[in-house]
């Protein structure tokens, strides 16, 4: 099995990562089905990385069609400890302009029942999610964006909407009245699942438009979003490369033990197939000594 410490999720417009050498395409199957496509593993600035295009080759998969569980579980199988996620967002603030980057620190959910947990099937777990992004990794991403020449903003709330349609004017105005900052369609489920998988997660939210609230601007269109992203791909790659170069042992993965006190069900009562499926995540917490399963606390 290939191994990588750092995962890079490429969103709309970012379908490859320049500078990766020793490339190898890795196709995985997970207990939750198949990921969006193969992972490209290799070496970038001396670090082992895994790049994955969120929407598949040729951008074929809608946000609501993404198999988020398979996509993040695949990262876990590859040994990923940190994920840098690049994605397109609309701005809900005057000061966040197209081509800016926002490093959000909170979420507000507006999706409709997307699977966003690995648990169930006889095993209950409840992971804390008050602070949904990895703070040390987010700070690093912000600092690297600033030194890379990006107009970058630290903190803010990301509204995750269902899509694939963009907001109505009434919705956009409501989100602004609530003090929301950016709006997108993908990052919430990724962050929830990464937390359960004990993978640090930070978002490079690339502003492409003003949603539709700024009526003096042309309303957001798919074509307009892609045009801005094409202009910003080189900058996004530059920020990611700097972050990877700077990601040392002093950057704490603040969810590395997120499951330690979150596993609720007596493991002796959990179906064997559920334990087997989740072994890459829960195996380190299972005590099999003494002839009876128990959780290591």
Image (spheres, helix red, strand yellow):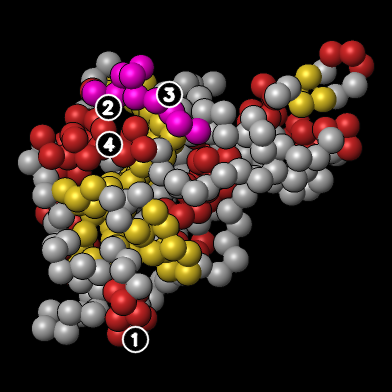
Q: Residues within 10 Å of mark 3 (few under 14, many from 20)?
A: many
For residue 270, side relative to residue 258 (left or right): right
**Mark 4 touches mark 2? (CB < 8 Å):** no
Dot 2 or dot 3, earlier in sequence: 3
From this viewpoint, which residue is outermost toward the right? Answer: 291
Query: On residue 139, which mark appears?
Result: 4
Q: CA distance from mark 3 to mark 1?
A: 44 Å
Which residue does the numbered mark 2 point to in the structure image? 244
The image position of residue 179, as x and y in percent, is 31, 68
Q: Quadrant of residue 254?
A: top left
Query: On residue 170, which mark appears?
Result: 1
Q: Which residues are magenta?
A: 246-255
Element at label 3: loop
Dot 3 or dot 4, earlier in sequence: 3
Dot 4 or dot 1, earlier in sequence: 4
The image position of residue 154, as x and y in percent, is 23, 47
Q: Is residue 211 magenta?
A: no
The image position of residue 131, as x and y in percent, is 45, 46
């Amino acid at each position: 099995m290939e191994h990588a410490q750092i995962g890079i999720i490429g969103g709309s417009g970012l379908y490859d990562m320049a500078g990766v050498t020793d490339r190898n395409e890795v196709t995985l199957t997970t207990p939750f089905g198949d990921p969006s496509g193969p992972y490209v593993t290799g070496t970038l600035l001396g670090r082992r990385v895994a790049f994955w295009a969120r929407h598949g080759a040729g951008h074929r998969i809608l946000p609501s069609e993404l198999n988020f569980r398979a996509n993040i579980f695949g990262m876990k199988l590859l040994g990923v400890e940190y994920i840098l996620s690049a994605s397109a967002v609309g701005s809900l603030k005057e000061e966040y302009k197209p081509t800016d980057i926002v490093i959000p620190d909170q979420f507000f959910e507006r999706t409709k029942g997307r699977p966003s947990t690995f648990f169930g099937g006889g095993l209950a777990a409840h992971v804390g999610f008050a602070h949904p992004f990895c703070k040390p990794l987010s700070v690093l991403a912000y600092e690297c964006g600033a030194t890379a020449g990006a107009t970058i903003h630290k903190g803010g709330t990301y509204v995750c909407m269902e899509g694939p349609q963009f907001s109505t004017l009434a919705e956009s105005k409501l989100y602004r009245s609530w003090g929301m900052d950016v709006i997108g369609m993908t990052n919430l489920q990724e962050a929830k699942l990464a937390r359960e998988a004990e993978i640090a997660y930070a978002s490079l939210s690339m502003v492409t438009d003003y949603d539709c609230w700024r009526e003096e601007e042309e309303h957001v269109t798919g074509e307009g979003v892609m045009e801005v992203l094409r202009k910003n791909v080189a900058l996004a790659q530059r920020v990611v490369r700097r972050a990877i170069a700077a990601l040392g042992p002093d950057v704490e993965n603040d969810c590395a033990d997120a499951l330690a006190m979150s596993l609720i069900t007596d493991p002796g009562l959990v179906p064997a197939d559920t334990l087997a499926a989740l072994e890459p995540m829960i195996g380190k917490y299972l005590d099999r000594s003494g002839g009876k399963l128990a959780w290591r606390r």
